[in-house]
Image: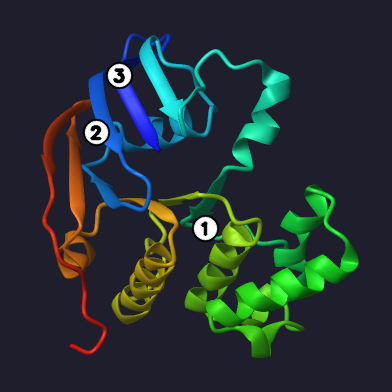
Amino acid sequence: MIAMDNVSKQYQTGVDALKRVTLRIEKGEFVFVVGKSGSGKSTFIKLLLRELDPSEGKIYIAGRLVNNMKRKQVPLYRRNIGVVFQDFRLLKDKTVFENVAFAQRIIGRTKKEIIRNVTTMLTIVGLNDKADVYPDELSGGEQQRVAIARALVNQPPILLADEPTGNLDPQTAKSIMVLLNQLNKMGTTVVVVTHNDELVDMLKKRVIRLDGGAVVNDKEKGGYYDEGN
């Protein structure tokens, strides 16, 4: 599903953000990418989103070589990837329903399809009763759930979550991770970039650790968090 072959990224400042990274993330996996500030996590995400090209190496998504992709091809490529950010990035002047529907309108879904698909996603994330309220009326955890619904409403095979719990209290952060785990069980490949070791330990998934731009550990922990505990 995601492959990096000997990928390096050097910025014009001379900083080596990633150094000879080689890894595979299979379809349906749940993977954490961890590391301290400056370890290369942000560059990793930007390369997958094709915001940057690698200085060396090759990146494949679903078997397709994505580095050096033509600019006009990028928007269509990004439909294969849902993205959730730390700061939610919701449209403040639109309701919850309208925020999620926005992603559907971009790809030309009909009104009937939008109503059906948005309603389904809001039900999955537990916010169907909040469809008509605005982001400022929601808690941080609820806003992040809206962001997740928006990222997944077009059914992309991959979800990238960049510090998705960074602005949330511990209990709310835990609930968001439980939701991401549930979505992974439904078939979505989930990649979470985080510095929260407690959440990583809670879910016991594969952990790729970056340090100084290099992969220093890639460990399959096995098991999963049991919501009953």
Estimate the spatial distance between the alpha carbons at disc 1 and disc 2, rounded to whole Å: 21 Å
Secondary element under disc 3, as helix, strand or loop, is: strand
Q: Kindly identify which residue carries mark 3.
A: 5
Confirm or deny contact between disc 3 and disc 1 (CB under 8 A).
no
Crowd band around label 2 with a 10 angstrom C-alpha radius: few (<14), some (14–19), many (20+) = many
Residue 142 falls left or right of residue 118:
left
Q: Secondary structure at mark 1?
A: loop
Q: Residue 203's mark?
A: none
**Residue 222: horizontal and vertical position, in percent?**
13, 59
Tag 3: amino acid: Asp
Quarter of the C terminus within the rendering: bottom left
According to the picture, the residue beneath numbered tag 2 turns out to be 39
14 over 52 or under it: above or below: above
Q: Which mark is residue 87?
A: 1
Would you say residue 94 is visible in this rendering? Answer: no
Left-right relation of 214 to 147? left
In the rendered image, residue 122, in percent from the top left (x then y), is placed at 62, 77
Residue at the (23%, 89%) spot, across then down: 228
Q: Is residue 160 above or below residue 70?
A: below
**Mark 3 or mark 1: which is in front?**
3
* Residue at x 31% of width, y 52% of height: 29
The answer to whether any part of residue 118 appears in the image is yes
Secondary structure of residue under mark 2? loop
Q: Nearer the viewer, residue 9 or 180?
A: 180
Residue 121, picture quadrant: bottom right
Residue 109, percent from left and from top? 83, 57
User: Mark 1 or mark 3, which is nearer the start of the sequence?
Assistant: 3
Closer to us: 16 or 159: 159
Q: Dot 3: within a 10 Å radius of its alpha carbon, few (fewer than 14), some, or many (20 or more) residues?
A: some
Residue 46 placement, left or right of 16 = right
